[in-house]
Amino acid sequence: MSEYMLLGVKTKLNLTDAQKVLMAKHAGIRRFTFNWGLGAWQDLHRAGCKFNYRTLRTFFNKHLKAEYAWIKEKGICQKVTEFAFEDLNAAFNRFFKGQAKYPNFKKKGKHDSFTINSGGKPMPFGGKSIKLPTIGWVRLYEGLPDGTTNKITISRMADDWYISFAYNQKKPEVYNNIIPAVGVDLGVKTLATLSTGKIFENPRYLRGYLKQLARLQRRLDRKEYGSNNRQKAKNKLQRMYAKIKFLRQDLIHKITNYICKNHATIVIEDLNVSGMLANGNLALSIDDCSFYEFRRQLEYKAKKFDCELIIVDRWFPSSKTCSTCGHKHENLTLKDRVFNCPNCGLQIDRDLNAALNLLKLAYIN
Ligand SMILES: [Zn+2]
């Protein structure tokens, strides 16, 4: 299991007038390139030609960049045109998948933005300034944690410019600060993900025992009914089950104590009981029981520590909704560990996104 999670950041740039002009030039080149690509795409499509965005990009780089000197002006990061073609391709992909409308020509002053990178080299960031490829150092209003990223997007809202990018961060270990409200996403691989970023993993030793439990279950299934060996296998299985249940319960006590001691309002999702009733597999039912135990402990500890516990209808689409823009990502599958928002571009750990959506309900209810 990864120790890292993918986070996204968007923060306001503190630019000089000259830098603002430079940003506007980049956004203009990106718009020009995108629109040229979209026009070419439509023409070639109408003419029945076979092509893809790379064909267009090669043609553009070979013939048009030479013609339009202002694209190659000093201080312009040439990656801006590469990403314009990638954006065009992504826009068509979203359209073909039925996730978005047919791409439109970009208008000046509307969603001005551009993306650049450092030719594949990671770009370090940290503190209140960041060095952009070709553009150079720019200042920020708020400090950033230390890290690296592979590409950055700069966008304009009203007269302000913002920088946004995704980065990997080590999952945080300890939080001592008290945060009033918290959303809690319960899972199997990660037992609990809090909206504060704190994570409670299913420990390695427990995962090992769970594998053993599954093995004992299979062994039992192979034994003949009524035989001595079957009884022996059954005893072994039950001992292992009791051991895991005890360890799990102990772990859940630690988690629910932490949550109730550090937060005044707790939001969790109602639990799915259908699985528990249906399956006779002990290894699976451990997970179901954990959910029950989690909720039972939270309920009495919330009273003990004087917290408000909000239990959200289990049909609330906490996993599929973007915690930034509210877009519903219907194509998200259980395999997707990272939530990639097709609407606003947010990239975030799936469970953290769900926890953040639950957190919001603390302020609505
Ligand atoms: Zn979004």
Image: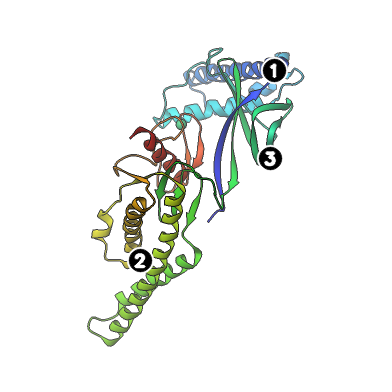
Q: CA distance from mark 1 to mark 2?
A: 59 Å
Residue 345 at least partly seen: yes
Type of amino acid under label 2: Ala
Q: Position of residue 308 (x, y in %)?
A: 35, 44
Within 8 Å of ligand 1, the CB of disc 3? Answer: no
User: Which residue is the site of mark 1?
Assistant: 22
Nearer to the camera, 154 or 174: 174
Q: Is residue 241 above or below residue 59?
A: below
Residue 149 at least partly seen: no
**Residue pictured at 46% horizontal, 34% vertical:** 341
Circle 3 SS class: loop
Q: Position of residue 81 (x, y in %)?
A: 64, 24
User: Which residue is the site of mark 3?
Assistant: 122
- Position of the C terminus, as image quadrant, is top left
Query: On the picture, is 153 further left or further right than 71?
Result: left
Q: CA distance from mark 1 to mark 3?
A: 23 Å
Type of amino acid under label 3: Pro
Q: Is residue 240 above or below residue 68?
A: below
Q: Earlier in the sequence, mark 1 or mark 2?
A: 1
Farthest residue in the bottom direction? 228
